[in-house]
Amino acid sequence: DTEVTQTPKHLVMGMTNKKSLKCEQHMGHRAMYWYKQKAKKPPELMFVYSYEKLSINESVPSRFSPECPNSSLLNLHLHALQPEDSALYLCASSPRGGNEQYFGPGTRLTVT
Amino acid sequence: LAKTTQPISMDSYEGQEVNITCSHNNIATNDYITWYQQFPSQGPRFIIQGYKTKVTNEVASLFIPADRKSSTLSLPRVSLSDTAVYYCLVGDRTFGNEKLTFGTGTRLTIIP
């Protein structure tokens, strides 16, 4: 298995909802990442997990809560989001860390 | 992290070779240069990575001069399917230092 999968592909949620995004990889990569991408902008790093431990949090609001239950799985729990949080959320993994990352197709999130 | 500068956009005709140059004047000794390709509503795709001189794979070539203050991604004989945004990134490859920062990228349009 040589890919990163993300579910769901699309998600619409209200500002009072709680939802979760899921990311999975079975390539044995020990670093996993969450990015946020707004339309026509580059991806912005949100969180980095190295060996299942959170190593980088780019000052992301607490309404976004990451979780890494095991080395293959990464979740992003969402709660009380704002309309401006609508974006493409990308997950990535890396075999060696650094610049070589493999991205999933993303979850298109719309907050109403 | 070294800042990168790329042209905002480029146009080219099908079948031609396309060269996209990236400037990174304050690249550090441990930094590698990495290029990604992104299609609309998809995750970025790792294309190529290098440290110095020339690297070639089945998709592209990467040319890095001796001073490493710039790099050129070369796409041979482009087709319409190469229309995408191309990002140049510079950073340390050490595991645990994964603050991958995307610049504005170059929007490449291939004309039939």
Image: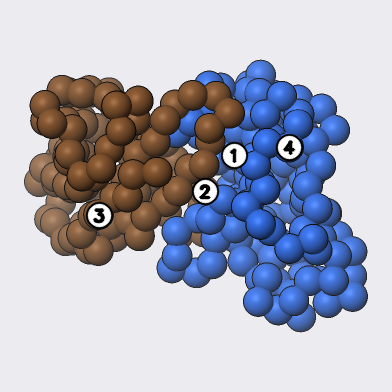
Chain colours: A blue, B brown
- Residue in view at x 68 percent, y 36 percent: A55
Image marks 2 and 4: residues in contact by CB distance under 8 Å: no
Residue A69: % across, % down = 85, 33
Chain hosting mark 1: A
Whole-number angstrom distance, CA of label 3 to CA of label 4 = 30 Å
Q: Earlier in the sequence, mark 1 or mark 4?
A: 4
Looking at the image, which is closer to me, B25 or A24? B25
Q: Earlier in the sequence, mark 2 or mark 3?
A: 3
Residue A98: % across, % down = 48, 30
To which residue does mark 1 refer?
A: A92
Residue sitting at the far top: A28
Dot 2 lies on which element?
loop
To which residue does mark 4 refer?
A: A54
- Residue in view at x 53 percent, y 55 percent: A44
Dot 1 lies on which element?
strand
State left or right for residue A57 relative to residue A77: left
Whole-number angstrom distance, CA of label 2 to CA of label 4 = 22 Å
> Where A28 falls versus A79 (above or below)?
above
Image marks 2 and 1: residues in contact by CB distance under 8 Å: yes
Chain hosting mark 2: B
Quadrant location, the C terminus of chain B: bottom left
To which residue does mark 2 refer?
A: B43
Q: Please state which amino acid type lies under the numbered disc 2.
A: Gly
Callout 1 crowding tier (Cα within 10 Å): few <14, some 14–19, many ≥20: many
Callout 3 crowding tier (Cα within 10 Å): few <14, some 14–19, many ≥20: some
Image marks 3 and 1: residues in contact by CB distance under 8 Å: no
Callout 4 crowding tier (Cα within 10 Å): few <14, some 14–19, many ≥20: some
To which residue does mark 3 refer?
A: B5
